[in-house]
Amino acid sequence: MSSPSTRKRGSKQYWPRVRAQKLTAVVNSWDSKLLPKEVGFLGFPGYKVGMTNVGLIDNFSHRLTKGTEINNAVTIIECPAVKVLSLKLYALDDYGNLQVVKEVEAQLKDKNLSRKIDVSKKKVTLPKAEEIVKFANSNEVSEVRAKVVANPSETTIGKKRPDIIELGISGNVTQGIEFVMSKLGTEVKVKDVFNGGDLVDSHAVTTGKGHQGAVKRFGVKLTAHKSEKKRRHAGNVGAWTPGRVLTTIPMPGQHGMHERTEWNKWIIKVSSNPEEVNNAAGFRGYGLVKGDFILVKGSVAGPKKRMITFVRATRPNRRYPKVAPEITYINK
């Protein structure tokens, strides 16, 4: 006889369990106060290479292994430089939603950009930052973002079409406008945004597994071997009343390829020397790292070659040290 009650299957935090609309994760909100003492970008994109393990000197103050050498699994993220494409100003509408009120776009000299968007060949004169600040004050602009172009063609993933995403800017509106206008059309590297020891949140689309049953999707146990009809299904899908299947019932459906956010990923190293991680054969399913990369403690959602967006931690764990540990070796 089955148990009279069981735990609720599936978290409402991850509902509905549908496929992501696109492969680049969308960051819906940016906290401009995450960098209170300076003005800069609040995030940076990268492409997942794979995992390895490193030896490092533990610098957590509360651990028994403090000061000794330990081994940690890390994820390698290749972060080619991005180009700042445009400045976007957001203001709240009558319903409290953010709406774009102005966009100032620069002309980028990128041969692959036309694969993604229509590039105008006419010369454009950019307005001065003072004029944009005056416009922002008159239209009650509440948020400043920068649209950047990530070039996967600089990696070995075999993709030429660039990815375009938005990055938040710290500071007030005036500081953000002046900062982005000074960066329009220029390259920004990952070392200009993140340092070793920083805590970040990762936004990514997980590995897709297609249409799966309740056992794989929710971890439902197999029914008894003498059960009627099926074994790999939920034993009970609900009562007579209400006459519908509740969202808490484990049912078959899409598994994986969901947009997910993971908090407090610790950046162990930011480097521009790919020889520190490359081996002769390269990484299986990816290839060789050609440029800047970061090492992130633990795993990161998504398959290899997928774009990951890192954002400064919105709720940082205070037990993590703010200084990167000393790395003794990197397994190749």
Image (cartoon, helix red, strand yellow):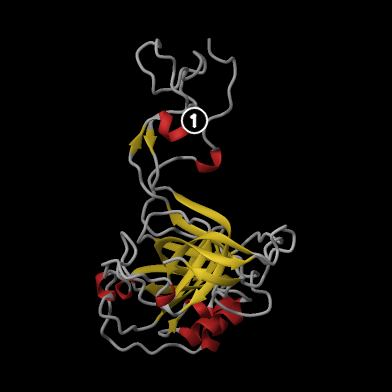
Query: In percent of the image, x 32 and y 60: which residue is there?
Result: 284
Task: Check disc 1: other Cα within 10 Å, few if <14, some if 14-19, many if 20+.
Answer: few
Q: Residue at label 1?
A: 247
Q: Is residue 182 above or below residue 160?
A: below
Query: In percent of the image, x 36 and y 56: which residue is there?
Result: 23
* Residue type at tag 1: Thr
- The x, y position of residue 98, in whole percent, is 53, 62
- Work out whether residue 163 or residue 49 is closer to the camera in this orientation and state it: 49
Label 1: which secondary element: loop
**Quadrant occupied by the C terminus:** bottom left
Tag count in the figure?
A: 1
In the image: residue 98, left or right of residue 306: right
In the rendered image, is residue 144 in sight?
A: no
- Work out whether residue 285 or residue 122 is closer to the camera in this orientation and state it: 285
Q: Is residue 240 above or below residue 109?
A: above
- The x, y position of residue 111, in whole percent, is 25, 80
In the rendered image, is residue 201 in sight?
A: yes
The quarter holding residue 71 reads bottom right
Query: In percent of the image, x 42 and y 50: which residue is there?
Result: 206
Q: Is residue 64 above or below residue 275?
A: above
- The x, y position of residue 243, in whole percent, is 47, 17
